[in-house]
Amino acid sequence: MHELSVTESILEISLRHANQANAKRITNLYLVIGQLASIVDDSVQFYWDIVSKGTIADGATLHFRRIPATLLCIDCNNQYKPGEDGFTCPNCRSDHIKVVSGEEFYMEAIDVEP
Ligand SMILES: [Zn+2]
């Protein structure tokens, strides 16, 4: 499963940060997920409870922030959100497009206790 490896890397990164800060416990994790990133919040939460067990991140709360998708039409330079037409440019009907935002996935912040 995709989300399992993603969740494991979140844990690894947060443990490294906590270690550097000499923290005893990780309490909150703030994650950013783009609308187009194929990651399901619930799955991450599910795997998180499993992989964090027995670590200093056990019981930490995950917070998710979704970033809406923004597309750019290469042909007419129109910037828009995917809608009823899917990814097709609503202005000139071109499929020659670029994703500006919505594919991101990263950890924004982490709360620790000393
Ligand atoms: Zn266009």
Image (spheres, helix red, strand yellow):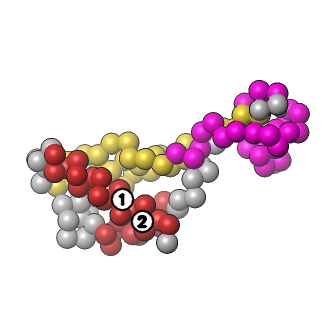
Q: Quadrant of ligand 1?
A: top right
Q: How far apart in space, not on screen, are marks 1 and 2 (Cα)? A: 6 Å
| Amino acid type, label 1 | Ser
Q: Is 24 rendered above or below residue 82?
A: below
Label 1 residue SS = helix
Mark 1 crowd level (few <14, some 14–19, many ≥20, 10 Å Cα): few
Q: Are marks 1 and 2 in contact (CB under 8 Å)?
A: yes
Image-based side of 7 in relation to 65, left or right: left
Our reading of the magenta stretch's main secondary structure is: loop
Q: Is residue 93 left or right of residue 80?
A: right
Residue under label 1: 9
The answer, for residue 82, to whether it is visible in the render is yes
- Seen from the viewer's position, the closer of residues 114 and 1 is 1
Between 95 and 38, the one nearer to me in the picture: 95
Q: Nearer the viewer, residue 39 or 64?
A: 39
Instruction: Residue at 86%, 39% (x, y): give it.
Output: 94
Residue 68 visible, this orientation: no
Residue at the spot 20% in from the left edge and 65% down from the top edge: 55
The crowd level at tag 2 (other Cα within 10 Å; few <14, some 14-19, many 20+) is few
Say which residue appears at 39% left-offset and 62% top-offset.
Answer: 7
